Each structure stands twice: as structure tokens, then as C-alpha cells.
Image (cartoon, helix red, strand yellow):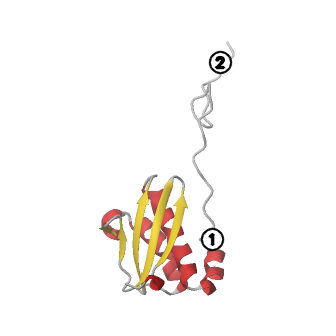
Amino acid sequence: MPKENIYYATGKRKNAIAKTWLTPGSGKIIINKRPLEDYFPLETLRTDLQEPFKLTNTAGSFDVNVSVRGGGIAGQAGAVRHGITKALILTDAGLRTSLKKAGFVKRDPRVKERKKYGQKGARARFQFSKR
């Protein structure tokens, strides 16, 4: 397979990191050597990561091969979407404006807040007793 038809990008979300390869093809999505429906059982997560293709009208024109690790399934789906977005921009720089307007280009900076010492959690506190 010629190297110039393979587009690689790394996507991140929460603690998940997705290495994404796009090749011209029929629209097959393989995640960790498993089909999309097998890896992400929830329909919402599947539609969420296919959103960049729908937005740019490139659905079915690229095969996607993803290696994703870390985080939970929602973070992994977000990381795959970010990786697909970055790889699509490599295929055609003209797609960047529509993807940027939808908010797919920038990495989602929201992560879990740390637990504070002497307290129950990040925001949760032990009950205050005056007497």
C-alpha cells in the first residue's frame, strides 16, 4: 500500500489516547482490531465518533483503523472522534473551517478534578456540625 494514501493523527480526550489511520476505502471502522459495533455497544457513542464524516460529507470514503487505550468508553469515543477530525484535515485542509466551527478540532480540555485533602472528594465535603 502506498504511504501517501495513509493519513495518521492522534486524538485525545480525558485519559484516552487514540492513534488513528485513515485510508481511502469503503467506510469500514476498526477499533483495537474489532468492528465499531462490537467495540462501542452504545449507539450514541458510535454516532458521536462518526460526526466528522457526516459534517464533511466524506462518510463511506475512508477506512478507519484505530488503536485506543486509557480512559472509559466515552473518553475513548471522544478521542477517536478527535483523531478522525485531525486525520481528515490532513486529507483536505479545506475541511478545517467546517470542523472547527462544529468544535471538533480543539481537544476537549475537561478532565476529572482532583480530590482535595481532608475532604470527601473534589467538591463534596464532610457534613459540618456546629455542636
Foreground: disc 2 or disc 1:
1
Please state if 26 lies on the left or on the right of 74 as rendered: left
Mark 2 residue element: loop
Where 77 sits versus 47, above or below? Answer: above
Residue at screen point 38% across, 82% down:
27
Horizontal and vertical percent position of residue 102: 62, 74
Horizontal and vertical percent position of residue 19: 46, 66
Horizontal and vertical percent position of residue 45: 44, 65
Residue at screen point 51% across, 52% down:
15
Where 54 sits versus 81, above or below? Answer: below
Task: Please state which amino acid type lies under the numbered disc 1.
Answer: Gly
User: Mark 2 packing: few (<14 Cα in 10 Å), some, or many (20+)?
Assistant: few
Residue at screen point 66% across, 76% down:
101
In the rendered structure, are the residues bearing label 2 and label 1 in contact, judged by CB atoms less than 8 Å apart?
A: no
* Residue 41 shows in the view: no
* Residue 85 shows in the view: yes
Residue at screen point 35% across, 64% down:
32
User: Mark 1 packing: few (<14 Cα in 10 Å), some, or many (20+)?
Assistant: few
How far is mark 2 from mark 1, CA to CA?
Answer: 46 Å
Task: Please state which amino acid type lies under the numbered disc 2.
Answer: Ser
> Which residue carries the number 1 mark?
103
Mark 1 residue element: loop
> Which residue carries the number 2 mark?
129
Where 61 sits versus 69, above or below? Answer: below
Horizontal and vertical percent position of residue 115: 59, 35
Position of the C terminus, as image quadrant, is: top right
Please state if 56 lies on the left or on the right of 50 as rendered: right
Q: Earlier in the sequence, mark 2 or mark 1?
A: 1
Position of the N terminus, as image quadrant, is: bottom left
